[in-house]
């Protein structure tokens, strides 16, 4: 194992609380890739909780999920980079993002 990997493992082992950040790119790939990633993420979080760790999940992805929704719908709305467009995409994608996580996390976690 690389030294930095050992250091990370040791930090996780000694931590009481762990924050996991999921970026948009992890949630906007092919559906099979996203599903595989989320299945493993849930498994890892469950393992950490079984070890007595408090786990906080922070996620980007609402804008990316909104863009995916727009690509499925015939629309005149562009997916540009203006603040108003990003806010609209985030508003459209937030519900889909929450539903995506909800479909993977068991109620007991």
Image: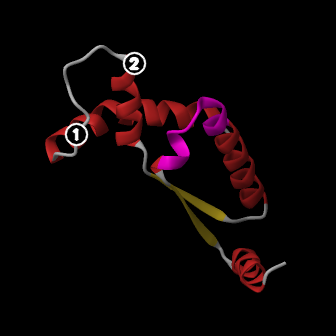
Total labels drawn = 2
In the image: residue 11, left or right of residue 23: right
In the image: residue 84, left or right of residue 61: left
10 Å neighbourhood of mark 1: few (<14), some, or many (≥20)? few
Q: Position of residue 43 (x, y in %)?
A: 75, 47
Q: Is residue 48 above or below residue 25?
A: below
In the image: residue 73, left or right of residue 76: right
Q: Secondary structure at mark 2?
A: helix
Q: How is the image coloured?
A: secondary structure
- Which residue: 41% across, 35% down? 65
Residue 107 seen in the current view: no
Q: Position of residue 13 (x, y in %)?
A: 76, 76
What segment carries the magenta color? Answer: 25-35
Q: Secondary structure at mark 1?
A: loop
Question: Which mark, by number, is residue 56?
Answer: none
Q: Position of residue 57 (x, y in %)?
A: 54, 55
- Which residue: 72% across, 46% down? 40
Residue 38 seen in the current view: yes
Q: Quadrant of the N terminus?
A: bottom right
**Magenta run includes residue 98:** no
- Which residue: 61% across, 38% down? 34
- Which residue: 75% across, 77% down? 5
Pick the front one: 46 or 20: 20
Main secondary structure along the magenta-highlighted residues: helix
- In this view, the residue farthest toward the top is 74
In space, the residues marked 1 and 2 are separated at their CA atoms by 16 Å
10 Å neighbourhood of mark 2: few (<14), some, or many (≥20)? few
Quadrant of the rendered structure where residue 90 is?
A: top left
Question: Which mark, by number, is residue 80?
Answer: 1
Q: Is residue 50 above or below residue 18?
A: above
Query: Which residue does the numbered mark 2 point to in the structure image?
Result: 72
- In this view, the residue farthest toward the right is 1
């Amino acid at each position: 194992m690389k030294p930095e990997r050992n250091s990370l493992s040791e930090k996780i082992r000694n931590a009481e609380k762990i924050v996991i950040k999921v970026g948009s790119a992890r949630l906007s790939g092919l559906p099979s890739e996203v599903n595989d990633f989320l299945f493993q993420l849930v498994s890892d979080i469950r393992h950490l909780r079984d070890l007595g760790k408090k786990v906080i999940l922070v996620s980007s992805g609402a804008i990316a999920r909104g863009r995916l929704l727009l690509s499925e719908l015939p629309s005149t709305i562009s997916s540009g980079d203006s603040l108003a467009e990003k806010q609209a995409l985030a508003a459209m994608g937030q519900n889909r993002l929450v539903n995506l996580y909800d479909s993977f996390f068991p109620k007991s976690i």
